[in-house]
Amino acid sequence: MNWESSDDRRSASGRAAASDRHGAAATAELTNADRNVSRETLPPTPATTEAGAVDVSRETSAAVEPSDTGSADDAGTHELTAVTPPSQTRDDVSRETSFDTPIAREAMQAIHVRNVRQEIWPRPARRRVMTVANQKGGVGKTTTTVNVAVALAQHGLRVLVIDLDPQGNASTALSVEHSAGTPSVYDVLLGSATLDEVAAEVEVAPTLRCVPATIDLAGADIELASQVAREQRLRKAIADYDAEVDYILIDCPPALGLLTLNALVAGEEIFIPIQCEYYALEGLAQLLNTVELVKSQLNAGLDVSTVLLTMYDSRTKLADQVADEVRKHFGAKVIQAVIPRNVRVSEAPGYGQTVMTYDAGSRGAVGYLEAARELAGRGAQR
Ligand code: ADP
Ligand code: MG
């Protein structure tokens, strides 16, 4: 196994390159924001224009000074708490600037994101095995799995993604070979290979690996049916996986069949993405019932620990209603950050990428960055 050591991860060239990319993206954002500031503050009068522009640049730089002065080199010393959360940042802007504009807020957000990108996130005390499940299709399971995985890995954490959907969408997004016959999770479930043998390197981050799913997996339900301990296969494979890893994220297919059952038995935590749409909660009861059943008979330690609101469209009242309802039901399990509906997110897999690399400055990527950061912060406290 060739994960980097903990010191290496702070200086790894891959990581440095990632920071550079992030830096470049952030700079582009800032440049855009600056451009916007000057465009948006054009007349009424030359006097207000100048005063306005100066105010924005002076006050925004003052507000972020503590973390903004840090260079990429000392990024490793950034703690999660060292960066001002966006909500607080916004408050500061409105308090400290003579006017509060959307552009000023955007500039602040861009600076905040640039700082977050340079952080090394804390490791959990022991590895977290998270099953990303929701038996509805198209709610963002795969998108959440791959983007959170890349975000965690870009911040120094060691991550293994297990693609458990015969469609292989996670493998596609991570650009991992998954044509029929490729050694995959199918071989692991049938006992002819170990996870370590089939896990492939993922190019975008040196600490990220992916166990691909191929179309062979489509028949696994039937093939496994006659096997001994058929629902324990993945659990055993994970127990045998002795590589140093901080997060194992399992992307489930959209059904409650034997594959998802294997993932529920294998996982310690369930991570449920919920789409902010009509009927979002419909069907969840079925998942939660299955979870209770698995808990009582097969995996007592299973815990629905994390819920993420995805594809949030701020223009609709409905999205807010769904978000409120989900928060009422799941309380503190719901990650504060919400993933907006954003076309860049859906374009990325077409290029064999996640949005984290396809368009790091997009709202979708920033949403996943914040969500993954929160997940890592919670993980360190468990
Ligand atoms: P699941 O794995 O639950 O079936 P996916 O992650 O494949 O769901 O998402 C379903 C579709 O929605 C995909 O085409 C994906 O690209 C798209 N999608 C997911 N999240 C977003 C988002 N935040 N904004 C826009 N499109 C999204
Ligand atoms: Mg999927």
Image (tube, helix red, strand yellow):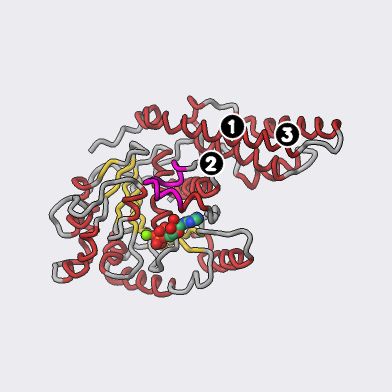
Residue 70 position in % (x across, y down): 56, 27
Residue 305, visible in the rendered structure: no
Which of pointers 1 and 3 lies earlier in the amino acid sequence?
A: 3
Question: How many neighbours does mark 2 have within 10 angstroms: few (below 14), some (14-19), or many (20 or more)?
Answer: many
Q: CA distance from mark 1 to mark 3?
A: 25 Å
Q: Is mark 2 within 8 Å of ligand 1?
A: no
Residue 274 position in % (x across, y down): 48, 63
Q: CA distance from mark 2 to mark 3?
A: 20 Å
Which of pointers 1 and 2 lies earlier in the amino acid sequence?
A: 1
Left or right, 290 with respect to 68, comes to: left
Q: Amino acid at mark 2?
A: Gly
Residue 361's tag is: 2
Residue 48 position in % (x across, y down): 84, 34
The reply to whether discs 1 and 3 touch (Cβ–Cβ < 8 Å) is: no
Q: Amino acid at mark 1?
A: Ser
Is residue 91 positioned above or below 69 on the image? below
Query: Based on the displayed image, in which of its 4 quarters is residue 14 positioned?
Result: top left
Question: Which residue appears at 45% of the width and 43% of the height?
Answer: 358
Is 357 part of what is drawn in magenta? Answer: yes
**Which range of residues does the magenta coloring cover?**
347-358
Question: Which residue appears at 21% of the width and 52% of the height?
Answer: 184
Main SS class of the magenta portion in the image: helix
The residue at which mark 3 appears reads as 38
Question: How many neighbours does mark 3 have within 10 angstroms: few (below 14), some (14-19), or many (20 or more)?
Answer: some
Question: Which residue appears at 48% of the width and 35% of the height?
Answer: 119
Question: Which residue appears at 59% of the width and 32% of the height?
Answer: 67
Q: CA distance from mark 1 to mark 2?
A: 19 Å
Is residue 167 positioned above or below 47 on the image? below
Which mark lies nearer to you, 2 or 3? 3
The residue at which mark 1 appears reads as 67
Which mark lies nearer to you, 1 or 2? 2
Is residue 65 positioned above or below 333 on the image? above
